[in-house]
Image (tube, helix red, strand yellow):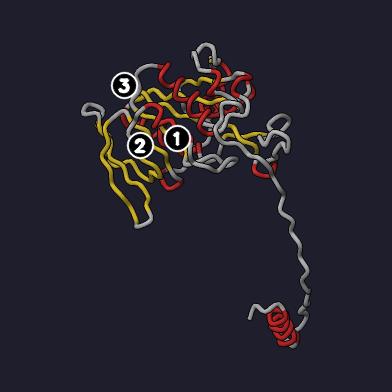
Amino acid sequence: MLKIIVPIKQVPETGNVRMDPETGTMVREGVVSIVNPLDLYSIETALMLKEQFGAHVTVLTMGPLNAVKALKEAISMGCDDGVILSDRAFAGSDTWATAYALSSAIRHFGDFDLVLTGERATDGDTGQVGPNIAAALDLPLATYVRKVNTLDPEGKTITVERSVEEGVETLQMPLPCLLTVVKEISYPRLPTLRGKKRAKTVEIPVLTAGELELKPEFLGLKGSPTRVVSTKSPKVTRNGRIVTIKEDKDVGAAVDALIALLEERQLI
């Protein structure tokens, strides 16, 4: 049976993203969080492969213990089980330190055939964790995958289409490998009632830095080679003019006013 691992992330809802000006890290406590929307496509891809070939799908996340909620949602969609990496030592990790911890957990699981991730997370928007995991595990990598053409569990190969600037590229890759997928690959299903009931009863193991024997110097804010040194909120200033059109005869005056404004600001 195929073994598929899907690393996911719990992120703040888009309107709730806030940065700590002192540490340069994202504020997560007391913020409404959801499964990273782009990870839903990697979850759906794993479930489609499970239905077609038979597979065991494990979802994996790193974060505070409340991130179990994200794993439970994935399980309610059809994933088999989940694991969370949770330890104060992980706080403030950048993409490199995050990938170090996640790849160590995947290695801890033992044999696997496929790792599927979303294209990127909506909070950091870097798209680096998936490729970093592949590098840490020395796995073949395909990014921006839009379609799985064929999968041969016996021959241990997979053929995929990936989006590139010039169009579409077709790759045949050996298993195990890592794919980062884009929206075009699927349409995420909704959790089922049966799935929700099952998710409530599934126990989520918690792995710590000590259990994974991770090196402290590679973890958290101190172990992150990149960091945010300052943040600024953009100021939106609008000094426009409002022209109200009540009748057809007002259209000409409105057009003249628009042209005059553009000329005044040397835009035409």
Q: Residues within 10 Å of mark 3 (few under 14, many from 20)?
A: few
Name the residue carrying label 3. 1
Q: Which residue is more in the foreground, 115 or 108?
A: 108
- Say which amino acid is labelled 1: Gly
- Say which amino acid is labelled 3: Met
On the rendered image, what quadrant is the N terminus found in?
A: top left
Vertical arrangement, residue 50 with respect to residue 188, above or below: above
- Sequence-first tag of 3 and 1: 3
**Picture residue at 41% right of the left edge, 36% below the top:** 45
Q: Secondary structure at mark 3?
A: loop
Image quadrant where residue 71 sits:
top right
Name the residue carrying label 1. 130
- Sequence-first tag of 2 and 3: 3
Q: Secondary structure at mark 1?
A: helix
Assess whether mark 2 and mark 1 are in contact (beta carbons under 8 angstroms): yes
Assess whether mark 1 and mark 3 are in contact (beta carbons under 8 angstroms): no
Vertical arrangement, residue 80 with respect to residue 185, above or below: above
**Picture residue at 74% right of the left edge, 88% below the top:** 249
Q: How many marks?
A: 3
Vertical arrangement, residue 215 with respect to residue 159, above or below: above
Q: Residues within 10 Å of mark 1 (few under 14, many from 20)?
A: many
- Say which amino acid is labelled 2: Leu
- Sequence-first tag of 1 and 2: 1
C-alpha gap between disc 3 and disc 1: 24 Å
229 relative to 38 in the view: left or right? right
Picture coordinates of residue 222 (x, y %)? 60, 26
Picture coordinates of residue 248 (x, y %)? 72, 85
